[in-house]
Amino acid sequence: MVNGTSTPSAPTAFLGQPRPVVAPLLERAADLAIAQVLDADGVPNGNLAEPDLSQAQLRTMYETMALVRVIDEKGWQLQRSGRLEFWIPSRGQEAAHVASALAMDAADWIFLADREPGAMLLRGASLQSLFAQFFGRADEPLKGRRLPLLLGDRALNIIPCMTQVGAYLPHAAGAAWAAKLKGDKTRFIVYFGDGATSRGEFHSAMNFAGIHRPPIVFFCQNNGWAVSTPTDRQTAADSFAEKGDAYKVRNLRVDGNDPLAVFAATKEALACTDEQGATLIEAVTYRLGFHTSSDNPDLYRQPEEVAAWERWDPLPRMRKYLQACGYWDERAEAQMQQRCEDEVREAVTAAEAMAPSEPAAMFDDVFAEPTWQLREQRERLLAELETELETELETGA
Ligand SMILES: Cc1ncc(C[n+]2csc(CCOP(=O)(O)OP(=O)(O)O)c2C)c(N)n1
């Protein structure tokens, strides 16, 4: 097993009837109106024009995607060796979130889901601060109070997600509407998965967006599965994008493993926020890894399906494109890999050495002024912890 991906092996205890293997939709991108710049080998295929990006921007795009992969591999190892309590893999989804976040301005607001560490990096979060969040350290922007990968930092205009699938979509639409009412030029993006489109909050947010036209990009990462629920059990519609039609929300499908197509689609969606308000983007991608470290996809999907998607892995695709442009070579690749691994190792060491979160911090920031109930609960918790500590000291337990 590599970083939460299954290696083809003898079938394990499959739960129920194995589902038929679905070929990657990206193989039929033109027929399915999935906007695409690059073919599987990173060669422009004429479907969508290459966006106007400098060599430096293209390299940033690729290097951020590569760093996200190294972070993911390290996080997985840390979880499997008992040093991290939980992990949510992002393997395979690097292009979707890195390229779309790169299309935003620093002043724009981002509502994250839980597979987008690259968005934090692009906004300037240090690796140490990311690992401090993963380890739940006291001295990180959110005081170590939630699951690893539910990232955020108000100072970077990044809002962490709620673990209830899709629950934050109306908040994102409302925040964008508030910005519009105030006359701000800020735009918004909200990430979510295909599973969230079955929640009422998705439909409330879409309906609201169709009427009030807030400046927001609804960015659905359709990664094929919502834990063990495949696309054909999630919707009878031909696509997730077309759900926007019912609400008169502009919508499109893009190859989510093609960073150039994702960048172009997001830029365009942002450019029309003034006139058209929201756009729903369905980024067609694939979760190559486990749903989380508590999952075992061998119980519900077949290794052949994963292997077919490996061919559309966004990293080699982008690397081949950069090489063909003359912007990258094997030496640059080896140096970058080494740099990423060194930086991640140092960040892990530094973050692990930081103080753990304070249990009473869970009561902070709930209200501007804590209610009497919260104050009382906080005091009770502190008293209980004190008693526990005294007992431990007395009994030497
Ligand atoms: C309201 C709610 N129901 C169920 C869950 C359990 N759960 C956590 S993630 C998940 C699937 C989410 O799938 P999707 O939205 O496609 O995003 P992905 O995890 O694939 O990125 C579920 C069902 C939850 N967190 N919230």
Image (spheres, rainbow, N blue to C red):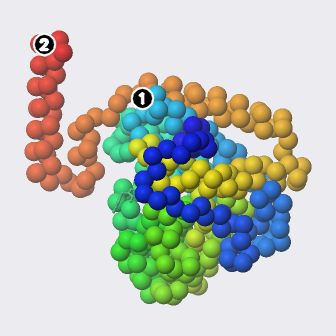
Depicted 251 relative to depicted 336: above or below: below
- In the image, what residue occupies the spot 44% across and 24% down? 353
Judge from the rendering whether residue 177 lies leftward or rightward of residue 4; answer left or right.
left
- In the image, what residue occupies the spot 69% across and 32% down? 339
Residue 277 in percent (x, y) is at 53, 81
Task: Respond yes or no on whether mark 1 lies under 8 Å from ligand 1.
Answer: no
Q: Nearer the viewer, residue 342 or 175?
A: 342
- Graded by Cα atoms within 10 Å as few (under 14), some (14 to 19) or many (20 or more), the crowding at tag 1 reads few
Instruction: Name the quarter where the C terminus is drawn.
Output: top left
Q: Quadrant of ligand 1?
A: bottom left
Residue 19 in percent (x, y) is at 52, 61
- In the image, what residue occupies the spot 59% across and 38% down? 2
Mark 2 lies on a secondary structure that is helix
Depicted 217 relative to depicted 11: above or below: below
- Residue 395 disc label: 2
- In the image, what residue occupies the spot 72% across and 71% down? 28
Depicted 45 relative to depicted 18: above or below: below
Query: Which numbered disc, 1 or 2, marks the residue closer to the eye?
Result: 1
Asked whether residue 238 appears in the rendered view, the answer is yes
Judge from the rendering whether residue 321 lies leftward or rightward of residue 257; answer left or right.
right
Depicted 216 relative to depicted 349: above or below: below
- Graded by Cα atoms within 10 Å as few (under 14), some (14 to 19) or many (20 or more), the crowding at tag 2 reads few
Q: How far separated are the C-alphas under marks 1 and 2?
A: 27 Å
Give the amino acid type for the residue marked by disc 2 in the picture: Thr
Q: Earlier in the sequence, mark 1 or mark 2?
A: 1
- Residue 187 disc label: none
Mark 1 lies on a secondary structure that is loop
- Snapshot quadrant of residue 267: bottom right
Residue 126 in percent (x, y) is at 55, 39
Q: Which residue is mark 1?
A: 82
Q: Nearer the viewer, residue 307 or 243?
A: 307
Residue 352 in percent (x, y) is at 45, 27
